[in-house]
Image: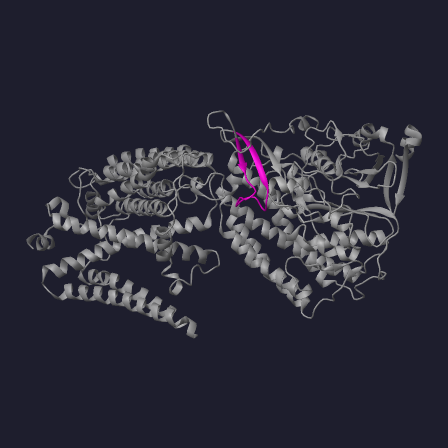
Amino acid sequence: MVDKYKRQYGSGLEALSYLGQNYFNVDRSLIPDFLKLLRDDEHFDYCVDITAVHYPKREKQFDVFWILYSFPRNERIRVKTQIADGKSLPSAVPIWATANWLEREVYDMFGITFDGHPDLKRILLPDGWKGFPLRKDYDILKQDQEWVQINLGIESGQ
Amino acid sequence: MNALMSYFGSKQTPGVAGNQLWALIYIFIIFAGVAVIVICMNWLERKVLAHFQVRIGPMRVGPHGLLQPFADALKLLTKEDIIPQEADKVVFWMAPVIGLLAAFTVYIVIPFGPTQAVTDMNIGILFMLGVSSLGVLGIVTAGWASNSHYPLIGALRSSAQMVSYEVAMGLAVVSAILMTSLNRDGTGTLSMLGIVQAQQQQGIWFIFKFFPLGLIAFLIFAIAMVAETNRAPFDLPEAESELTAGFHTEYSGLRWSLFMLGEYAAMIAVSAIAVTLWLGGWMRPFPNGLAGAGWDFFFALWPGLTFIGLGGLAFLGVVRMPSAQFFKIQRVGLAIFALALAGLGGLLIAITIGAHYSQRNIIASTSAGIAYVYWFLLKVAVFMYLFIWYRATWPRYRFDQLMKVGWKVLLPISLGVLIVTAIVGMIL
Amino acid sequence: MNDRTDALSNLDLETPEKPYLDSNELIINMGPQHPATHGVLRVILKLDGEKVLGTECVIGYLHRGVEKIAENRTYTMFNPYVDRMDYVAAVSNGLGYCQAVEKLLNVEAPPRANYIRVILTELNRIASHQLWLGTHALDIGAMTPLFYTFRDREEILKIFEKYCGARLTTHAFRIGGCQYETYAGFEKDVKNFLAFFPPKIDEYEELLTGNRIWIERTKNVGVISAKDAIAFGVTGPVLRASGVKWDIRKAQPYANYADFDFEIPIGQNGDTYDRYIVRMIEMRQSLRIIEQAINGIPEGPIMAKVPKVIKPPVGEIYHSIEAPKGELGYFIVSDGSTQPYRVRVRPPSFVNLQALDIMVRGMLVADVVAVIGTLDIVLGEVDR
């Protein structure tokens, strides 16, 4: 499988393995097609998780992961891509229905927008919240106090 | 004075005999009695439900929680009376009153004994069914007057439920009435007293007549009466974990307690109908099988023995209470209660023994009257316990399933039972 | 599979609080404080009369920022935090996290530690299912099973208390194994429980399984097909009741689960009744596992050789276990320091709750409460 895709995509795709877990590191341009291919051809029909990691010092700051599982193969793989701040990714909702809330949470926590998502709004934090908490530059002590001031009438949440 | 004494020799209920004094006395006794029973039911429900659920229920307010209903009543009386701002005030006030009126008016014809009833209309059962249906009006007005979305939905659901089950109830009642017409003189009767007397004449409780027809009719009525009173498993309109909290959401304090009173009074009333129609009313068990003066005396001792037994149980509670100083006041209270119960039992036994040996009319008829009332209330008490048992055991029916049971299951069966009873009655 | 995603479009909610009495569609709010939603969950229902046209869940009332906290704690310090997410099945959370970090460190917990872990995790699975059963039955109206299950759950919590000192948020395991040796009398207690419990499951089943009212309330309520379940990423008993025979303990065994012989129950219809039956059978199978484990527990150390200061090499790892609610996964990114760079918890209840929308379409309002109960969600896990 790996060789097939390496031949197909050439340098846009790397197949790696760490501690027995396989993952693909793909270029951002491959994203909706590669995931669709994995679902249709390789039967990775269960999207376990979609998540992101923030590396503020890198040029392409975010690592976005799709963790997939295939029932017939009994195998779990990760698909990893890097994007820069402010750029958006195509949504995986047309591919797996579960991506709806998972992508909303990534947006809520990191600020990564997904094009084509039916209802991209905050899920865990209140709607008017400013800031994206799981970014490394979000300081817990110096949070934006606007929301608590408007809605709770208190000076600050600290 | 004449009116007072003439009752003891009469063979009619005070209403029929024109004895206004005793009719008033009976009305007073009924009000007081229903209040006492509702208080007992409140305590019993909490205790019995708790024991079903491996807990012990209220234990602190009075020994074994016996004063809990009084504490609840006091709390409800002293609560703030909240009326929603947009509510229709007059209708809001009137709704529980309508419910109460409907629930209490039926007690006029309930026969606690052959002469122990306020009156005996010759359309007694029709009157009971008709007036108890007025309770639906109270519920609908309560839901409407609250001017809130959820009580309105709850009220409409509740009224739809009550109306649907009344049909099956009515048909089951008719098949019991049919059985009364199998008397020697061939005429049936709608009067409550007449129904029990018919069972007496035919020598069989209607639940056993034309077995299993009487039993099926009884069971249909038993199910329908649970739905009529909005009790589990048909309590969707008033359950807390459903979306709409029911027609009495906006009522607090005294008004809510009026609704609760009305609900319990309705429970007692429909149980009384069931007892009268199928279980022989005031008759003691085995009036034909175990006949004779000896058996009569034995069964006449039961009221007194029951109270002495209850006093004994209370005394057992006294003995088992921990002996710490903290519990002293509870021990004393429970001991007084036990003594009171035992004393009442002793008084009843004294009256029975007195009636057995003396010739005075007044004591004999008092003793007989007490016995009749006792057997009637005992059977009603069994139904009350069943109400609590159902609530503890079963989940709730969803509303559409509830309506399906009422219209698609109970109605055809009750129609069938009615037709078969009529045919069998004609043949035999 | 794609037509489902069209149905996920949001409800057009301008003012969700105001109900419209005279239009055909009604918007009703099951607010955050509600006796039937297990925790602070807000469900906005769009109704046509009594039928549900769509729902929208508003969550986040219990969001405590656990993932952000993880970035400021060392690996060992973060261990107690994971219990607080799914507080009902705290032992499973701890197991998943400790195993994920052990994988990152490339160490294996010794077999004795694994056996102890399995016993405690399966006991916790039974406790979690008991709590589920009590609250689910209460939502549908049967008040009594709640008290029975809580009474029996006490026995399990007593064992936990004797083992690690806490009943609910146990913090039972450490990275590398277990810290506490089994206390004197552990074996006797567990064997007593194994003898004590099967009649209790029979008691619960007697009250509910054959009960006509229960069957009518739960059959064909909240049906989700296997295809939809996989598309929505639903896992755990919900997936198994839809007919997919998949359990991580069998598919990708961890912690010596391959040593034990047990069955995975599946259902046919994917409705609430099947989920109920699946969970009851799971409780019995857990008893089987515990019995095999307690009879075959090996001697040996309970803690692997783990350095005092845990500094895993740079890398990422994803490890998941079969928690009572579904697939609980930990995705840990390490940058070589003592504090994790990113900990992502894949909560089963969060993903299962997403499926609520399609499960209640076309059902009546009273069924929404039943379906929320049958999904077995814990808001601590949904919101983290």
- Residue closest to the far left: B2
Q: How many marks?
A: 0
Residues A58 and C206: in front is A58
Residue B81: where, in percent of width, then height? 37, 45
Residue at the image position 11 percent from the left and 55 percent from the top = B8
Measured along the vertical axis of the image, is residue B46 above or below residue B167? Answer: below
For this rendering, which residue is in front, C205 or B82? B82
**In the image: residue B146, left or right of residue B192:** right
Instruction: Name the residue located 26 percent from the left edge and 55 percent from the top edge.
Output: B375
State whether residue B29 is above or below residue A13.
below
Q: Quadrant of residue B304?
A: bottom left
Say whether residue C36 is magenta. yes
- The chosen color scheme is one colour
Q: Is residue C95 visible?
A: yes
Q: Which x, y percent locates residue C256?
A: 78, 55
Can residue B109 be seen here? The reply is no
Residue A111 locus on image (x, y percent): 75, 36
Q: Is residue C57 left or right of residue C180?
A: left
Q: Position of residue C59 (x, y in %)?
A: 63, 40
B336 left or right, relative to C84: left
Position of the N terminus of chain B by quadrant: bottom left
Q: Nearer the viewer, residue C91 or B182?
A: C91
Q: Any magenta on residue B14?
A: no
Residue lying furthest front? A155
**Quadrant of the rendering where the C terminus of chain B is positioned:** top left
First to last magenta residue range: C27-47
Q: Is residue C140 above or below residue C296?
A: above
Q: Is residue B198 left or right of residue C33?
A: left
